[in-house]
């Protein structure tokens, strides 16, 4: 499909979502980040709880910084290599907006990496799982880039639902399929969120997920029927062969995801300014498990990360 091809119904919905206006403080924070990487920024994707709630104070905004290439994004050879081998690199940013501090965390992805990692061929779920959730696209450098991102986000939705459908019974609704998909992806990483997070995430944007459900299944070629009240349901019983293949695929995704997540945690402790403190805050926020970071651990973050990982795993902070 060329970039100038007409949008499908799914892509039209995604394009409208990505174009939603955002608060001025968010735009200024995004611009402040873009200025740190001037010359290679194609746009910035805003996502996460602050997008959902609009509550910026005492929170950290989440962004994906989309760059033309890692070579252009960094002067450091190590950062280029780290981002290429194990994307994304993660950074922290603060800026003053109307007398208040706006804190942000941002991931750096090349456009080419996004393209590859939202497709079903990507065993690691982290990009297509996150890109299938609500986002807004800020500071696009061109209409062509905006169209490209729209198609990549649409592909993430298709990959997400396509991976879950073989494990959903005939008659499954949007609620069931999305909850199953979200739950599977959370389970395929080292996550501190409790069981049931998939349904919780679905409920936060149920109207949005339901709106995408029909157009996505149409693109996937999955038969649907109307339950009689306007509710679309899956109209196909999965074969035993397809179910077995899906279970096998998710086994590999879980294995890949837990290893990659662990390596990213270690990498973040060396590439992310204040990374070990951020990770401690993140774990406590999601799991309730509080950890204390000692001064020596900031000097040796990799060793400290390994020690905390083993201890927290025993305490149930990771699944």
Image (cartoon, rainbow, N blue to C red):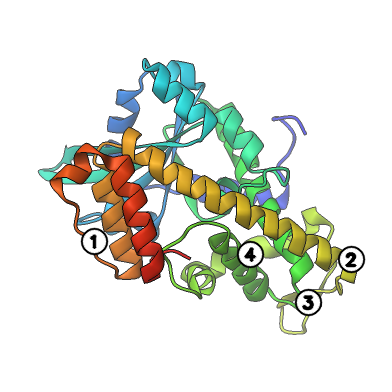
Name the foreground residue: 283 vs 19: 283
Q: Label 4 to label 1, Cα distance in Å?
A: 31 Å
Q: Label 2 to label 3, Cα distance in Å?
A: 14 Å
Q: Which residue is mark 4?
A: 181
Q: Residue 103, located in which quarter of the rendered image?
A: top left
Q: Earlier in the sequence, mark 2 or mark 4?
A: 4
Pinpoint residue 120: horizontal percent, then vertical percent: 72, 47
- Residue at x 35%, y 68% (from the top left corner): 287
Q: Tell me, yes or no, whether the two marked residues, 1 and 3, touch with CB atoms within 8 Å.
A: no
Q: Which residue is mark 1?
A: 291
Q: Mark yes or no: residue 239 visible.
A: no
Residue 206 placement, left or right of 267: right
- Residue at x 36%, y 70% (from the top left corner): 315
Pinpoint residue 126: horizontal percent, then vertical percent: 55, 49
Pinpoint residue 53: horizontal percent, then vertical percent: 35, 62
Name the foreground residue: 296 vs 164: 296
Q: Which residue is mark 2?
A: 241
Foreground disc of the pair 2, 3: 2
Pinpoint residue 7: horizontal percent, then vertical percent: 70, 42
Q: Earlier in the sequence, mark 3 or mark 4?
A: 3
Foreground disc of the pair 4, 1: 1
Q: Label 2 to label 4, Cα distance in Å?
A: 19 Å
Secondary element at image label 4: helix
Q: Which residue is mark 3?
A: 169
Q: Residue 311, located in which quarter of the rendered image?
A: bottom left
Foreground disc of the pair 2, 4: 2
Name the foreground residue: 191 vs 212: 191
Secondary element at image label 3: loop
Q: Earlier in the sequence, mark 1 or mark 3?
A: 3
């Amino acid at each position: 499909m060329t970039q100038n091809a007409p949008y499908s119904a799914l892509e039209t919905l995604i394009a409208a979502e990505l174009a939603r206006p955002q608060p001025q403080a968010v735009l200024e924070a995004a611009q402040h980040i873009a200025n740190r990487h001037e010359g290679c920024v194609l746009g910035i994707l805003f996502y996460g709880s602050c997008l959902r709630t609009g509550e910026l104070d005492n929170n950290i905004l989440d962004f994906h910084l989309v760059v033309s290439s890692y070579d252009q994004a960094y002067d450091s050879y190590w950062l280029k290599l780290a981002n290429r081998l194990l994307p994304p690199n993660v950074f922290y940013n603060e800026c003053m907006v109307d007398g208040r501090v706006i804190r942000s965390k941002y991931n750096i992805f090349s456009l080419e990496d996004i393209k590859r990692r939202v497709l079903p061929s990507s065993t690691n779920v982290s990009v297509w799982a996150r890109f299938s959730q609500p986002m807004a696209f800020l500071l696009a450098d061109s209409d062509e880039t905006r169209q490209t991102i729209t198609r990549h986000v649409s592909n993430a939705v298709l990959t997400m639902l396509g991976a879950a459908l073989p494990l959903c019974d005939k008659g499954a609704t949007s609620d069931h399929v999305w909850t199953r998909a979200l739950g599977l992806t959370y389970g395929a990483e080292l996550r501190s969120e409790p069981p049931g997070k998939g349904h919780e995430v679905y409920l936060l944007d149920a109207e949005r997920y339901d709106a995408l459900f029909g157009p996505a299944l149409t693109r996937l070629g999955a038969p649907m029927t109307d339950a009689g009240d306007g509710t679309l349901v899956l109209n196909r019983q999965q074969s035993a062969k397809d179910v077995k293949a899906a279970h096998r695929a998710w086994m590999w995704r879980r294995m890949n995801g837990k290893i990659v997540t662990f390596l990213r945690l270690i990498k973040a402790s060396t590439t992310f300014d204040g990374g070990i403190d951020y990770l401690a805050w993140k774990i406590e926020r999601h799991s309730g498990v509080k950890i204390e970071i000692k001064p020596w651990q900031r000097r040796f973050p990799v060793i400290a990360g390994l020690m905390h990982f083993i201890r927290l795993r025993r305490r149930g902070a990771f699944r």
